[in-house]
Image (cartoon, rainbow, N blue to C red):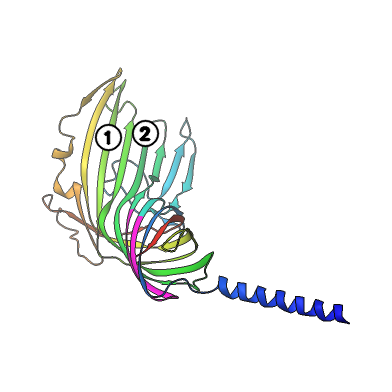
Amino acid sequence: MKMTRNALLACILMATTYVSQAQNDMTPIEDSSFYIRVTGGYSFQSGKTEFNNADPNELTGIKQSTDITVNADGSSINVKSLNGTAGAGLKFNVTGGYMFNPYFGAEMGITYFHGDKTMIGRLRSPQVNSEANTYLRGFDVAPGIFITPNFKAVNPYARIGLIVPVAGDLTIETVARQKNGGGEGTDILVEALSEVQAKFSVGYFGALGITYPISDNFSVFGEVEIKNLSIKSKSAKITEYSTTAISDGQSQLVPGQQLADLPVYEKEFEFSDDYNQSTTTQPDQTKPRVIPTQYVNASGTGINVGIRFIL
């Protein structure tokens, strides 16, 4: 009986110690405080949609959001639909925040995004080979909230907020080569670089992650982030354009077919939700062309890692 009582007392002592330790592990480690977070990560495409028309002048033969292959004798054509986003790439972020209490805070971050090149159209045939690629580079700001149970050791958290692009643009690179386009034995190579400017746009993000403390004021973290961002286009401009004749390994610019030779109507574009266009008169070649509004899908899902300092 005495041994039973001793065993019972030992069990109670062990249970009390375990509960005390568990409570200690879940004790908040900070009150209200400022913090800085530095992050690096990579996003993959998500929420894929059709790509925009990258050749309003119809110089390359590329059809919107398609990969077309014509066989050697021209008797058949294979057409693949291209879908995706401009949201894949590297990102670097610095965020400042304030914890109002151990469980809830607000933050403001600035991110530089270095987007991957993405093929948005291609045509391959015995006579013509054309390809268009796009990439997004720029900065955005991200106000958000930070929520955590604030455990002492491994600590989960969630972040949600808005994404507001503030600088940068979408670049489109186009290359088209026409076999014997300048006569037998002379190919014609057309190269163009276009930049698209954006109107004010707002997206949103959400992230789930964990932090691990290294010291009282320093921790490391990893997270999975989802961003949903559609950028409304404001204007576009062809900034580089050249036509080159290639024969026997030698190349020469074709007179009259360079950037300076393009009228404004063929190298500057404005996007509009609603506009009128005459069907009886020729367009004014000295003014930008108005075309329907387009949206750049910059959505992505990625992984971020970084460090967090409590000030």
- Image vertical order of residue 176 relative to residue 293, above or below: above
Q: What is the three-letter code of the residue carrying label 1?
A: Val
Residue where numbered disc 1 is placed: 190
For the point 30% across and 46% down, which residue is it?
Answer: 172
In the rendered image, residue 49, in percent from the top left (x then y), is placed at 43, 58
In the rendered image, residue 15, in percent from the top left (x then y), is placed at 70, 76
Task: Give yes or no for residue 129 being in the magenta stretch.
Answer: no
Q: In this view, which residue lies farthest toward the left? A: 286
In the rendered image, residue 227, in percent from the top left (x then y), is placed at 42, 62
Residue 162 quadrant: bottom left
Q: Earlier in the sequence, mark 1 or mark 2?
A: 2
Q: What is the three-letter code of the residue carrying label 2?
A: Val
Residue where numbered disc 2 is placed: 128
Residue 207 visible from this viewpoint: yes
- Image vertical order of residue 252 relative to residue 63, above or below: above
Q: Quadrant location of the C terminus?
A: bottom left
What type of secondary structure mainly makes up the magenta span?
strand
Callout 2: SS: strand
For the point 22% across and 45% down, which residue is it?
Answer: 238
